[in-house]
């Protein structure tokens, strides 16, 4: 997969196995996983398996989460992007916009910047009709980002025993 998305401060590029250590550093942090089932990874092999799942998404669906790196320093900050989601909403599959960043990079607007670029890519390049997102009800920041980038609240659902807010945006509603 040869996707490269640039923003003012960021580059979004395909994830590779070379990102395994950065994924482990991010996903072994309990604070990063507070709203992801409180289940941080315990081994680098878990991070490698997660990356292999992303690589499978690339192969199977032609899209998936992208590594987010600082354009100036080339430092791995986290990931963002759109994936074809088949598990979270048991009643249907959808294109999910998501993001996750190392804790030291929180509060810098990177998630919002990367999410906006991902929406643009999804609607303009991939020609998707609808992009969705979800966040645990208690995750104030993630809910704020999804609203800020234009996704519309569209109800709630329960996943892994947690109340989640559901968001969606159709291409004809999107304002670049």
Image (cartoon, grey):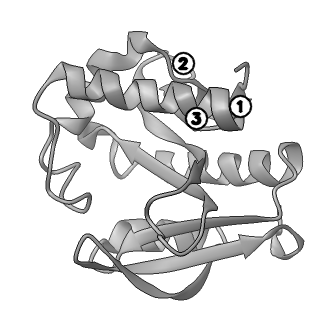
The reply, left or right, for residue 90 in relation to residue 19 is right
Residue at x-position 53% and y-position 25%? 55
Q: Which residue is mark 2?
A: 72
**In terms of sequence position, does the residue under pointer 1 or pointer 2 come before the other?**
1
Residue at x-position 43% and y-position 80%? 165
Distance of label 1 from label 2 (alpha carbons): 15 Å
Residue at x-position 70% and y-position 30%? 6
Q: Give the label on residue 5, or none.
A: 1
Residue at x-position 33% and y-position 48%? 106
Residue at the top extreme, as displayed: 18
Determine whether the residue tagged by mark 3 lies in a helix, strand or loop: helix
Nearer to us: label 3 or label 2: 3
Q: Which residue is mark 3?
A: 57
Q: Give the label on residue 51, or none.
A: none
- Give the percent coordinates (x, y) of residue 118: 67, 47
Closer to the camera, 54 or 78? Answer: 54
Closer to the camera, 19 or 74? Answer: 19
| Label 2: how many Cα within 10 Å (few below 14, some 14–19, many 20+) | few
The reply, left or right, for residue 16 in relation to residue 8 is left
- Give the percent coordinates (x, y) of residue 79: 46, 37
Residue at the bottom extreme, as displayed: 155
Q: Which of the 4 image quarters holds residue 23?
A: top left
Marks 3 and 2: CB-CB under 8 Å?
A: no
Nearer to us: label 1 or label 2: 1
Residue 134 in view, yes or no: yes
């Amino acid at each position: 997969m040869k996707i490269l998305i640039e923003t003012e401060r960021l580059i979004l590029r395909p994830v590779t196995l070379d990102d395994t250590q950065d994924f482990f550093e991010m996903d072994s942090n309990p604070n990063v996983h507070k709203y992801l089932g409180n289940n941080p990874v315990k081994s680098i092999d878990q991070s490698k398996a997660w990356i292999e799942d992303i690589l499978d998404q690339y192969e199977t669906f032609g899209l998936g989460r992208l590594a987010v790196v600082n354009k100036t320093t080339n430092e791995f900050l986290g990931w963002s992007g759109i994936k074809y989601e088949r598990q979270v909403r048991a009643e249907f599959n959808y294109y999910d916009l998501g993001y996750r960043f190392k804790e030291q990079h929180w509060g810098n607007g990177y998630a919002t910047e990367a999410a906006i670029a991902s929406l643009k890519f999804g609607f303009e390049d991939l020609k998707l009709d609808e992009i969705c997102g979800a966040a645990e009800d208690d995750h104030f920041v993630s809910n704020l980002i999804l609203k800020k980038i234009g996704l519309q609240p569209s109800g709630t659902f329960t996943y892994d025993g947690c109340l989640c807010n559901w968001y969606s945006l159709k291409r004809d509603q999107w304002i670049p």
